[in-house]
Image (cartoon, helix red, strand yellow):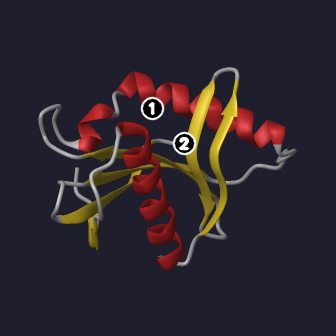
């Protein structure tokens, strides 16, 4: 996977939930900086959760954000399996139904990987169009 990258400065040591939320905030700011508009954050339904739903004004972009403080479990993007991609596509269509988006519009699935080593600059890598439209 190739991807765009940016850096940010991490602050204090965080627990897993706070670390994930901070990674999602960094990802949302990154997307806005790329000219996109974030429509939903942490949208939930019975089937699961979507981290970020955004638009580039041409279509919808569903972003799975993975944040890691170390590489003991592999790179953040490696946590997004093909099974996870399929589940997130189903959630994206549920999001569209929930928001009465009945018309067809392009739908893209991206991964944003945030590496957040304690005391070091955070690195964000954006992997657009990880899955094909369904």
How far apart are labels 2 and 1 at the CA level?
11 Å
Labels 2, 1: front one: 1
Viewport quadrant of the C terminus: top right
Disc 1 secondary structure class: helix
Crowd tier of the residue under label 2, counting other residues whose Cα lies within 10 Å: few below 14, some 14–19, many 20 or above: few
**Residue 39 image offset from top left, x and y in percent:** 69, 59
Q: What residue appears at the point 85 percent right and 44 percent down from the top-left corner?
A: 102
**N-term-proximal mark, 2 vs 1:** 1
- Quarter residue 96 falls in: top right
From this view, report whether residue 116 is shown above or below residue 11: above
Q: Which residue is outermost to the front?
A: 12
Crowd tier of the residue under label 1, counting other residues whose Cα lies within 10 Å: few below 14, some 14–19, many 20 or above: some
Nearer to us in this view, 103 or 113 = 113
Residue 133: numbered disc: 2
Does any portion of residue 134 appear in the rendered image? Answer: no
Q: What residue appears at the point 42 percent right and 64 percent down from the top-left corner?
A: 26
Residue 85: numbered disc: 1
Q: What residue appears at the point 37 percent right and 27 percent down from the top-left corner?
A: 82
**Residue 6 image offset from top left, x and y in percent:** 28, 71
Q: Which residue is outermost to the left?
A: 72
Q: Is residue 50 left or right of residue 116?
A: right
From this view, report whether residue 96 is shown above or below residue 37: above
**Residue 125 image offset from top left, x and y in percent:** 28, 60
Q: What residue appears at the point 47 percent right and 49 percent down from the top-left corner?
A: 21
């Amino acid at each position: 996977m190739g991807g765009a990258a940016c850096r940010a400065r991490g602050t204090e040591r965080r627990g897993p939930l706070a670390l994930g939320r901070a990674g999602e905030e960094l990802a949302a700011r990154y997307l806005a900086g790329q000219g996109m508009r974030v429509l939903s954050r942490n949208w939930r339904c019975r089937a699961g959760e979507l981290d970020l739903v955004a638009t580039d004004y041409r279509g919808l972009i569903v972003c799975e954000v993975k944040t890691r403080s170390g590489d003991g479990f592999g790179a953040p993007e490696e946590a997004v399996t093909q099974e996870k991609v399929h589940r997130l596509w189903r959630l994206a269509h549920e999001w569209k139904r929930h928001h009465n988006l009945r018309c067809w519009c392009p739908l893209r699935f991206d991964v944003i990987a945030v590496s957040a080593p304690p005391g070091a600059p955070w690195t964000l890598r954006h992997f657009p169009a990880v899955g094909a439209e369904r």
